[in-house]
Amino acid sequence: MSRLRYVQGPVETRAPGMLKNTVYGIRATYETDPEVIAALLPQPLVAIERPEIWLQMVHVAMHVTETDTVEIGALTVGVNCTHEGAPGAYCFHMAMEGETVVTSGRERFGEPKKIAETHFERNGDHLRATCSRHGVAYFEIEGTIGEAIDAPLKFEEHLFCYKGMPSIDTPGEFDGDVFLTRLNWQRNYNRRRAMTGSITLRESPYDPLADIPVRRLIDMEYVEGGTATGGTLLRKVPGEWIAPHWVGRHDDPRNTGVELGVRKAA
């Protein structure tokens, strides 16, 4: 009997929707320049009063089925914002290990994922993690784990993404509808501890996080425990709202970006 694996065969039954994970790593928020946020945030999302970037660098064990677990490192970066008054973050950069987790997230949820190399090292209460692409460790976060913080261990947070199919014929346009999606991340941590540390952003023409400077580190914490991730399709949006930002999903070292106002010295 012959076999053809380009057609889906029987799959192991599991509950639809949320994917359960076990994680540990670092979450942080930093303040950047208001003009950066104004240029970076697409419609219909609305900036909050303070120009904040939210991020997490975590090791994730993805429990795909009862017997199948995939372990990856993952960096997620977003702009704190609101949509119709509801808080969340516009997710403009995700980098992680593994082709399957990258392509599935891009196609299903519109997540701006890229394949990357991640590294975690811990020495006592000191934790350091890096994310590298094209041989450049363009992101590094490190710190010392401190005391437990008075914060919820169980909560849900949201990230906003855009899902679309770029045009075959016309650059900057899309074939078909473009959607605003929302990632729904349920947290069930067993530990949340404050950290003191730093974030280093190194120049990379492929992943220009260095263009979003760290002006002030607002908070940093170490977390570990369980999460469940899923998503929701929110609404259709005009393609021109997200078209200028689409370049961040690809490696285009020729892109010179847009000029922003010159920041005066403090």
Image (cartoon, rainbow, N blue to C red):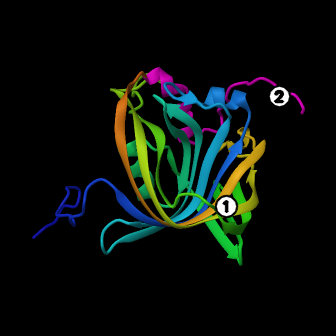
Q: Nearer the viewer, residue 87 or 172?
A: 87
What residue sits 40% from the left and 37% below the top? 181
Q: Position of residue 59 (x, y in %)?
A: 54, 65
Q: Residues within 10 Å of mark 2 (few under 14, many from 20)?
A: few
Q: Secondary structure at mark 2?
A: loop
Q: Residue furthest bottom?
A: 124
State whether residue 223 is above or below residue 171: below
Q: Is residue 190 visible?
A: yes
**Is residue 87 part of the magenta span, yes or no?**
no
> Which mark sits nearer the N-terminus, 1 or 2?
1
Q: Which residue is mark 1?
A: 130
Q: Tell me if 174 is positioned left or right of 118 in this view.
A: left
What residue sits 55% from the left and 52% below the top? 95
Q: CA distance from mark 1 to mark 2?
A: 28 Å
The amino acid beneath tag 2 is Arg
Q: Position of residue 15 (x, y in %)?
A: 25, 60
What residue sits 65% from the left and 32% below the top? 255
Q: In this picture, which residue range is highlighted in magenta? A: 239-266
Asked whether the residues under the numbered discs 1 and 2 touch, taking CB atoms below 8 Å apart as contact, a structural biologist would say no
Q: State which quarter of the image contains the C terminus.
A: top right
Q: Tell me if 221 is positioned left or right of 6 in this view.
A: right
In the rendered image, which quarter is residue 73 located in?
Answer: bottom right
Q: Which residue is mark 2?
A: 263
